[in-house]
Amino acid sequence: MTALYGVIGDPIAHSLSPAMHNDAFRALQYDAYYHAFHITPENLETAVKGMKAIGVAGFNVTIPHKTAIMPYLDEIDPLAEAIGAVNTVVRRGGSLIGYNTDGPGFIQAFREESGKDVKTEKVLVIGAGGAAKAIYYSLAKEGAAAIDLCNRNVERAAAIQRANPFSCQSDVLGLKEAETRLGEYTLIVQTTPVGMHPDTEAQPVSLENVKPGTFVSDIIYNPFETKILKEARKRGARTQNGLGMFIYQGAIAFKKWTGINPDTDRMKSIVLDKLGGTLC
Ligand code: NAP
């Protein structure tokens, strides 16, 4: 019988996940189908019960349900529990188990594209929203040498640092202080929506003090090269956009569902094709 997978969100029509996962199933001749389900917040609990009742084998969770879904699951993986958000649900027997593959997806993309290990990195994370928290805790879990967090609202960054269950050296900074200290970091991760389409001329911090050779990652992938990545490249930094993080969060979810590592080059070309462009 064809296994059913999917993604729940509101809105969901724009999701690139169905094309990416359905192609991976086809390539592996794996008898499964991945569907985008438009689920509004008032229907979330019923939808999760329905997924369980009809035997959906696994699904992704996107905005606005990543935190709200947690009480309706049978088990939550410790990293997802710490992050306070689930983006992947796996069915095991009769139970639904929640995971977060966003942070691990970022780390895998960083490893692949930089050829480096996070353990040697002194990191600055810009932003303190859901994505920043997933990346910060995942980096801490993997033993990054130091991780500083800067945000417009400094208290929000401090709250993430205080609740971090993994030990790591870490300072909390305002955006101006971070700008003056940019030269200290080997990896800078931009996690705010600033610079995303359509406001592509915006940039959360100036990169005047970035050192050549620093790895600058922006988790946005629309546009492929944000204003901050353009400035980073001009100043001699190595750059990475958010496409790799998106691909690997999906590839890690796929492995959890099927036990198979999908072909990530193929996933990337499907997503690029959908987005209509080439990587920066
Ligand atoms: P979020 O929870 O709403 O957090 C937004 C963060 O951006 C907050 O720290 C906020 O600061 C900061 N911010 C917003 N506007 C700002 C401005 N004008 N100046 C300075 N800081 C500003 O959002 P999120 O869920 O973390 O998502 C953030 C971005 O990551 C989005 O662009 C999303 O598309 C992208 N993302 C990409 C992937 C991927 O796979 N590549 C995965 C997840 C998310 P305050 O706390 O001061 O308000």
Image (tube, grey):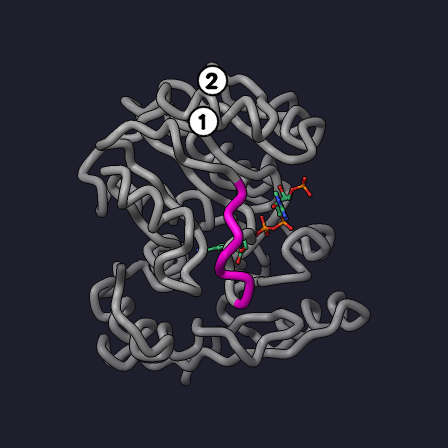
What distance separates the C-alpha of mark 1 from that of mark 2? 6 Å
Can residue 81 be seen in this snapshot? Answer: yes
| 89 shown above or below 30 | above
Badges 1 and 2: C-beta atoms under 8 Å apart?
Answer: yes
Cβ(mark 1) to ligand 1 < 8 Å?
A: no
Question: Residue lying furthest top in this view?
Answer: 169
- Tell me, yes or no, whether the highlighted magenta stretch contains residue 177: no
Residue extent of the magenta highlight:
198-204
Instruction: Rate crowding at label 2 as few (under 14), some (14 to 19) or many (20 or more) other CA atoms within 10 Å.
Output: some
- What x and y, as percent, mark residue 14? 52, 77
Task: Tell me: 232 left or right of 77.
Answer: left
The quarter of the picture where residue 28 lies is bottom left
Does 202 lie within the magenta span? yes
Instruction: Look at the numbered disc 2 and give the secondary structure of its residue.
Output: loop
Q: Which three-letter amino acid code belongs to the residue tagged 2? A: Cys
Q: For residue 112, which numbered disc appears in the image?
A: none
Say which of 235 and 213 sits in front. Answer: 235
- Front residue of this view, candidates 187 and 23: 187
Give the residue displayed 43% in from the left and 77% down from the top.
Answer: 18
Q: Which residue type carries mark 1?
A: Ala
The residue drawn where x is 76% and y is 66% is 45
Question: The C terminus appears in which quarter of the rendering?
Answer: bottom left
The tag on residue 168 is 2
Magenta-colored segment: predominant secondary structure? loop
